[in-house]
Amino acid sequence: MRKHSTLLLFLLVSLLGKAQTEAVKDSLVKLLDIAKDDSSKVRLYIELGNQYEVDDLQTAGKYYLLAEDLSKRLHYKRGIIKFISNYTYLLNVRGDFDSSLLLNKQSIQLSTEISDNLLLAKSLANTGNVFQYSNDYDSAVFYYEMAVKLFEQLDDKTMIAYIGDALQNAYQQLNQNDKALQYGKEAVRILRGAGDTNGLGQALLNTANSYQSLGYADSALTCYNEALTISHQLNHKRLESASLLGIGNIHLHRYEADSMKPYYEKALVLSRQMEDPDGESTALRGLALHYLLKKNFTGAKENITNALTIADSLDLRHEKVKNMKVLASILYGLHDVIAAEKCLDSASVIENQLAGDEVQKKTLVIEKRFETEKKEAQIKLQQAQIKQKNTLNYLLGAFALSAIVIGILGYRSHQHKQKLQQAKIEELEKEKQLAAVEAVLKGEEQERSRLAKDLHDGLGGMLSGIKHSLNTMKGNLIMTPDNALGFERSIDMLDSSIKEMRRVAHNMMPEALVKFGLDTALRDFCNDINQSGALQVNYQSIGLENAVIEQTTSITIYRIIQELLNNVMKHASAKSALVQVSKTNSDISITVEDDGKGFDTAILKNTRGLGWSNLRSRIDYLKGRMDVQSAPGNGTSVLIELKA
């Protein structure tokens, strides 16, 4: 199975069209040279990988990994998801299904975190692809059906067609060819109407396979020929090779020896160019059968021997069985009956091994399903099918297995209840802690507000009154020059005291925060720092200007940024800092970066400072998370994500 037949996810519209040409690649590379390190450059890397994917998987992988690296540096989750969806195809081709499955599950998690149903649907479908590649077709159908439900909600006909094509392949492997053909014909109809040539070519190839499995050779040949035409238009070598093999197979079953030969020869050349051992073995076997039909036993034996060499060197046991059966037919033709029988005996041994491996594989799949409660319905369905198809001994075995499963599920149910109870206790404890933190923070802010008001209205008023009285007395007193100078100095000190008192009151409860909101208060705070000369702060806000934020939340965010900038001024030895605050729907993102001396973030695990503790408490109160990136000599970047 190939990637495009199982569902190519995250199809991007090429910047210069879909033609797979060197000119397109060169144009994209030129754009890459002048692109800045942002999300657009991530998309360029992905598009370049797509362009190389058809004929150079190694180069495609290089560009995909560059997209991942840049996305992580930018904290660009969508870019990471795009990387996963494309790079896992390469992993699937290499047979590294465990790594592919791990990445795709990460993609599902990231899509859920950013609440994007479209990306979630594609991630689910891509996970289904991995299961299909690893021959776990029931699990593949399970994930595809979840993806289809989301795409139906999104009314995305094209993606429904792609998944339909993938389901066609799964049902072919489950020997439900009527159902496979139903999905395939619908996929071809949708993709043809949408003008999706790439997807149409793959769907036609798979639908041809379905027709051929059901014995509709003429319909299969029509689909293969159209897929072959499309492969030439797209310069899609894998599609071309598969189409050639399919056409050759139809001529083989019609015993048209001369007609089948050119198709197998072309497929052999392409398979060798693409380093596709499966395709090469199949083409060599087809040529061997051609020569066998022509009674050229020498040519037939030479080709099938080459096919066996490939199968042996790469342990392609399914291919080896097919090749050995053809070799046996050739040996019969050469009247070497003993060698032919030995060849068939060897093939039978391998078939029994494969059957045993298949049974063991299915057993492992069933055990995995028992670990997930979502698969209970599928397990019961399989057990019912077993009861209908097998003898009494199998029925007794199924009954014993059912008893074991019930015991396991009962035990798991008990454990699940205990985990739920423990989780509920932990949730209550967390709510209790958050309530305590909320009370402390509110009490703290109320006390700050009271002290600020007392300082400003009480002590501030008294000091201003004293200043006024002294200025009035000054005009009625006769003083020596020295006394007059001392009197003026006292007035200046009193002025400074009033300013300092007002500054302290402002820090305890900024008036701008109460009157004009968070954005204005933060801008004033950063401007005050700039005017002091202690640090040059660049403040930026997105979506905050007219945002309505609850006052307790605003105060908490203000205190968080205040604490972070105070830390920069105290410890970082920085010249400049950047403060960015953005609000999207109910999410608030805070970034504070400085060009200071940096530090080893490992020390944060053991720090017990009051400022750091207060900072963590405020973030926990708002149910947020914080990420600190720093290293000695490289400055510090703090990212905080909150729910408003």
Image (cartoon, rainbow, N blue to C red):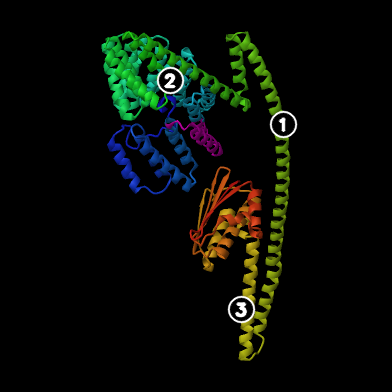
- Between 340 and 500, the residue placed more toward the observer is 340
Q: Secondary structure at mark 2?
A: helix
From mark 1 to mark 3, how far is it between C-alphas? Answer: 72 Å
> In the rendered structure, does residue 121 fall within the stretch colored magenta?
yes
Q: Amino acid at mark 2?
A: His
From mark 1 to mark 2, how far is it between C-alphas? Answer: 46 Å
Q: Quadrant of residue 94?
A: top left
**Going by the picture, which residue comes out furthest to the front?**
338
The image shows residue 401, relative to residue 95, as above or below, that is: above
Q: Amino acid at mark 3?
A: Asp
**Pointer 1 residue:** 417
Q: Where's the N terminus, which quadrant?
A: top left
x, y percent for residue 620:
65, 49
**Mark 1 or mark 2, earlier in chain:** 2
Residue stretch in magenta: 94-123
**Pointer 2 residue:** 318
Mark 1 residue crowding within 10 angstroms, few (<14) / some (14–19) / many (20+): few
From mark 3 to mark 2, how far is it between C-alphas? Answer: 96 Å
